[in-house]
Amino acid sequence: MGAGTYTGLEAVSNGLPILREPRVVTAKRTMHYMAFSLAITVVGLMIAYLLFNVEDQPGKTLNAVLFENMTASWQGNSGIIFVWMTLLSEAVLLFIAAQTGFLDGPRVMANMAIDRWLPTRFATLSDRLVTQNGILLMGVASLLLMLVSRGSVGLLVVFYSINVFITFSLSQLGMVKHWWQQRKTEKNWLRNTAINGTGLILTSFILVSVLLIKFEEGGWVTIVITGGLILFAMFIKNHYNKTMILLKRLDSIVVSVETPARNVQAVEQKKKEPQFDPGAKTAAILVNGFNGLGLHTLLGVFRLFTGVYKNFVFIQVGAVDAGNFKGAAEIKNLEKHVKKETNRYVKFLNKNGYYAEAFTKIGTDVVAEIEGMVPEITARFPNIVFFGGQLVFPEESFITRLLHNHIVFAVQRKLYMQGIPFIILPIRV
């Protein structure tokens, strides 16, 4: 059905972040080479099928029949050896190609986790265990599918082809939508829309054709399994949406801490002009916006370590997800928003007599970005302890343990290896 041909191009697009700079230019050049070589190979095989009268034979691939017909007049065992060497080469090539799933799979899962369609712990690709767990999850799922299908090539090929073209159709539809939204700022939007629109028509046509033709041969099984995975992702998304409602209870503190009449009561004795003292004890707090979780963590530090810390550092990484990954303008807006949120913490503490600074970054892997900022922070504040708040739910369950953000634990492991103290404060919701 051509699914295998397209997945080579898909692997390049999914693996764009790990290509060498200039990444976009390298990816485009690679795709051009692949497109031309694959087109020549496919056209050459189709012509060869016609020239050598290749017909479908039970238990044999068309390529096997082709090479048998080509070598039928060869003397001795040379023809048989040539056929087996060719088929072995194909098998090795397919085996290597199959590894792209393990290379790009965790990366795709990380993108879904950032958008809350999978457990957020899969978003931390800088954590070796996250990538390892993603590979193991895909490997175990593949093994189970092999066992359940009893290795039926016909069923597995149908399952593969349908899901591949679902992916391609959605990707092309997304690009068509993107160019339409960018029509006022992008000069070549019409040309780009035509290219992706053509791709959408082709992939959608193949998808519908495969579904109709192969429905009784495994198409319905594909719909059931893929539909089940979609429902599972929707369940996870719904759980995170409900959690956001719970977190709003914590946000009630935001108004009270910014009320001038209560500023003095929120922390210890107020000082007029906070001064930077590099030798003083410093508390570095991981935050995700000026919200209840961050403020409860800050006040927890004051409550547990009264009078200990004189300097405060607020660290926030703006995660680039589907909501803001819409162009350079949106990325800049995200960067401004992150700086604005952390500056609210700085102003709040400055008003109450404490020296504070903010460190921010934008990225897809929060843990990796935080780890990258640590050397700069520790150099400026050598006497430092890091803090992070972790949600504690009223009813702890397997679902909450599986789904909820474990960034603070991942950061703690990273800093532990560097000999830097990190304290996790429980925040009840």
Image: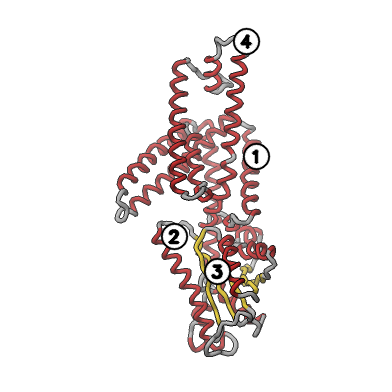
Element under disc 4: loop
What x and y, as percent, mark residue 370? Answer: 58, 64
Element under disc 2: loop
Q: Circle 4 sits on which residue?
A: 76
Query: Of the residues under marks 1 and 3, which one precedes in the sequence?
Result: 1
Q: Whole-Å distance between the Cαs marked 3 and 2?
A: 24 Å
What x and y, as percent, mark residue 239? Answer: 55, 60
User: Could you say which disc has been placed on residue 324 in the image?
Assistant: 2
Q: Circle 1 sits on which residue?
A: 143
Task: Name the front one of labels 1 and 2.
Answer: 2
Residue 280: quadrant of the picture = bottom right
Locate the C terminus by quadrant: bottom right
- Residue at image location 47% in from the left, 71% down from the top: 339
- The local crowd at label 4, few if under 14, some if 14 to 19, many if 20 or more residues have their Cα within 10 Å, is few
Query: Of the residues under marks 3 and 2, which one precedes in the sequence?
Result: 3
Is there a contact, CB below 8 Å, between mark 4 and mark 1? no
Q: Residue flagged by tag 1: what amino acid is it?
A: Leu
Q: Whole-Å distance between the Cαs marked 1 and 2?
A: 36 Å
Query: Of the residues under marks 3 and 4, which one precedes in the sequence?
Result: 4
